Image (cartoon, rainbow, N blue to C red):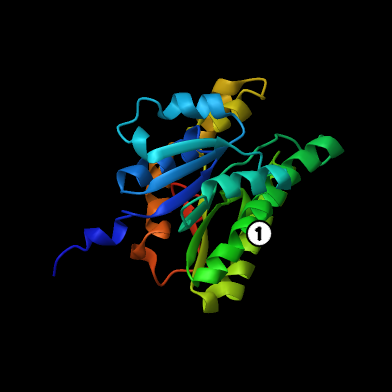
Amino acid sequence: MTIPTNKFDLTAKHVIVTGGGSGIGAAITELFAAAGAKVIVGDINVDASLKQHANSDYSSSIDVHHCDISDSESVNNFIAISCKNRKIDVLVNNAGVGFVGTISETSPENFDRLYQTNVRGTYNMTKALMPQFLDRKQGVIVNMASICGLVGVPDRFAYCMTKFAIIGMTKSMAMDHAKDNIRINCICPGRIATPFMFDRINEYPDPEAIRADMDASQPLGRMGTPEEVATVALYLASDASSFVTGACESVDGGWFAG
């Protein structure tokens, strides 16, 4: 028996990745391009995203365009650009924002900001692209959820709310569209060493102590890397997972197991 490495090949595939300018999104963009895909990055910070991928070995396979996923008009404009003279095969809903705080510490403005970006943003992107997937009777969607969508995490009230919602959306859409040959799964990262994570850590009075505590909270004793999440995204986006839909893949160093 031979190892079917071609199952992970994305040659000739067109992939949209939101929030592809840093952290997990950047790692997904690079890995998918290395696997042969043409990757269209939608990012609210175009300059940072362009800088991130400028020196990539696969820069010719990466396009970057502005997209504010919380704004449906911005999303529709981005989808129109992305789909010009090509069909999209895979959507990775990765972009998101966070906030540290209990319900008492979460203002209505912060609650709405997280909901609009994390939940409504995933809705906006999927809603805009779904007609194309339905017309072709094929498509793959990978949503970025979180361990915070599987268990309650202290001081993450609003963030947990949005990530529980992402898991619910994923499972519901997977059931609705299995008959249409559209696979929809999500990834639930634990604590991953990204600029996003370090921004959250720096909101605490003693960031170093929080970093040590976060490392220790995962059975493997460390944070994960963006590249470790990207490999799972590649699996879910490729033919290697052709019989997988409605799944929530934990990439958390064993956190959810305990």
| Front residue of this view, candidates 241 and 229 | 241
**Residue farthest to the left, as pictured:** 1
Q: Residue 236: x percent and y percent?
A: 42, 59
- In the figure, residue 12 lies in which quadrant? bottom left
In this picture, residue 218 sits left or right of residue 234: right
Q: Residue drawn 49% across and 67% down?
A: 183
Residue carrying label 1 = 127
Q: Residue 106: x percent and y percent?
A: 81, 37
| Front residue of this view, candidates 200 and 50 | 50
Asked if residue 13 is positioned above or below residue 137 in the image, the reply reads: above
Residue 171 makes an appearance in the image: yes
Q: Residue 204: x percent and y percent?
A: 66, 24
In this picture, residue 126 sits left or right of residue 51: right
Considering the numbered disc 1 on the image, is that residue within a helix, a strand or a loop? helix
Q: Residue 224: x percent and y percent?
A: 43, 39
Asked if residue 161 is positioned above or below residue 216 in the image, the reply reads: below
Q: Residue drawn 44% across and 69% down?
A: 244
| Front residue of this view, candidates 79 and 177 | 79
Q: Residues within 10 Å of mark 1 (few under 14, many from 20)?
A: some
Q: How many marks?
A: 1
Q: Residue drawn 28% across and 62% down?
A: 7
In this picture, residue 199 sits left or right of residue 242: right
Quadrant where the N terminus is found in the figure: bottom left
The amino acid type of the residue labelled 1 equals Lys
Q: Residue drawn 60% across and 65% down?
A: 131
Residue 223 makes an appearance in the image: no
**Residue farthest to the front, as pictured:** 85
Asked if residue 157 is positioned above or below residue 184 in the image, the reply reads: above
